[in-house]
Amino acid sequence: MLRKLMYSLMERDDKDIKQKDLAEVIEVDRSQLSHFFNYKKELTFSAWLLAIRFLKPEKEDEIVEILAATMIRDEARQNCRMLMEYASTSRKLDLLKLLITSQKKANKENKIWSNFYEIAYKFQQRNASNEDLLVELESLKPTTQEMRAFSNILKSLIFYMLKEYKCMFRLARIAEKQVKEIKNKFIRDSYMARIGEIFARGYLYLKNDVRKSRFYANMVLNSKFLNQSYKAHTLHLLGTSYLLEDFDMSVEYFNRYKEVLTAGGRNELAKETDEKDIFFAKVLWDKNVSPSDTSDPLERMHYYAKGGDVNAVMKLSAKVSDDDPFALCYLGIALNDAELLLLSIARFIETGDKYFAELPKRYIEEMHHEHIVSAEILYNIKIA
């Protein structure tokens, strides 16, 4: 069945794809591919994934379902482990649940793998507390380097949600070293991308280190095996990282993010990107924009604050939280109040966001020269 499927994928109206060309794309020796077609050897899931994305990317979901059913039936243990990782990062949670259930009946090693991915599933579904998930993780005993790395990745993600940032960074660094020793290229690539996302977010918001954030963000974007839906959030992160530095680069990444959202039918989120992120960038960089371009009260506050319309800002402030750091910043701009801007900085840092603490800092330095907030001081203020 799988041979017929591959042959059908290789068929073209003009000229069929040759085996030697396919072997190069899926990163296997031509002899290995010949063994596959001669029923002497099976292809790994990672090879199949590269083949699908080269030959028929629009049929990825359909073909992966066929592969999963076949690999579960044939008890292809390593492929099922790769499939669980694929389903998790692709947010194909129904498929992930099916794989977890099937692997609980497998050999001892895959049973343990399924336990780890069950915790990942619960984390993604948000149907268990972070504290409970940590207890579950601590009760599991990883038996391989891959499991140890994945356990630390999950713990790092959970500690981020719990705002235990020191623990988050420590475990992510341990996991990074562990992942580099993993031999399975699919698992190594995917786990490294997971770590890249953690570090990209952490270095941007928790440390205000945009260079390191972009380095790790590009690690995610350069992954061979992750799909676009996983990478989308990294595009948004990169757009954010350029907000205070380069208008064109920022909007370019936000537009790429919107393209992925629109392709996946997530039109409401794409609209929100226009009304919040891109609107914010236009106001910040004094581009042509109208308050009617957004329905978000905070973004309108920013617009009116920059224009000096105190009454409009005060009216909108009633619609947002009193201690929202952006609201405090915009009130400070409108009222030319350094104390409110300083309070905004403090609030941003309290919420784990040193990056956007730069916004009120810049306005203070523009409007109140006696209040100079050193970037070095801001960087070194400890969040956790």
Image: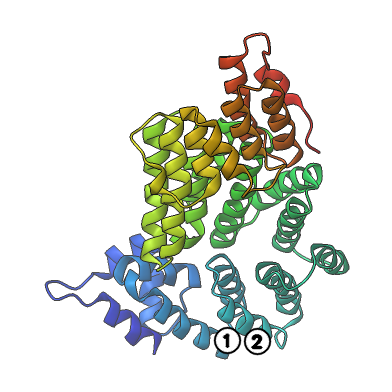
Specify few, some or many for label 2: CA neighbours under 10 Å numbering under 14, 14-19, or 20 or more: some
Disc marking residue 98 = none
* Coloration of the structure image: rainbow
* Image position, residue 38 (x, y; %): 37, 83
* Image position, residue 172 (x, y; %): 72, 47
Res. 27 in view: no
Give the labeled residue for mark 2: 102
* Image position, residue 83 (x, y; %): 56, 74
| Residue at the farthest left position | 14
Specify few, some or many for label 1: CA neighbours under 10 Å numbering under 14, 14-19, or 20 or more: some
Specify the amino acid type for callout 1.
Ile
Mark 1 or mark 2: whose residue is earlier in sequence: 1
Q: Residue at x 46, y 29 (%)?
A: 307
Label 1, label 2: how many angstroms apart (C-alpha)? 7 Å
**Residue 10, placed above or below residue 381:** below
- Camera-side residue of 214 and 3: 214
Q: Secondary structure at mark 1?
A: helix
Res. 369 in view: yes
Give the labeled residue for mark 1: 72
Task: State left or right for residue 325 relative to residue 275.
Answer: right
Task: State left or right for residue 88 relative to residue 273.
Answer: right
Question: Residue 119: which quarter of the image?
Answer: bottom right
- Camera-side residue of 100 and 19: 100
| Residue at the farthest front position | 311
Specify the amino acid type for callout 2.
Ser
- In the rendered view of the protein, which quadrant contains the C terminus? top right
- In the rendered view of the protein, which quadrant contains the N terminus? bottom left
Q: Residue at x 66, y 72 (%)?
A: 125
Callout 1 touching callout 2 (CB < 8 Å): yes
Task: State left or right for residue 118 relative to residue 132.
Answer: left
Q: Residue at x 22, y 78 (%)?
A: 11
Q: Residue at x 61, y 56 (%)?
A: 191
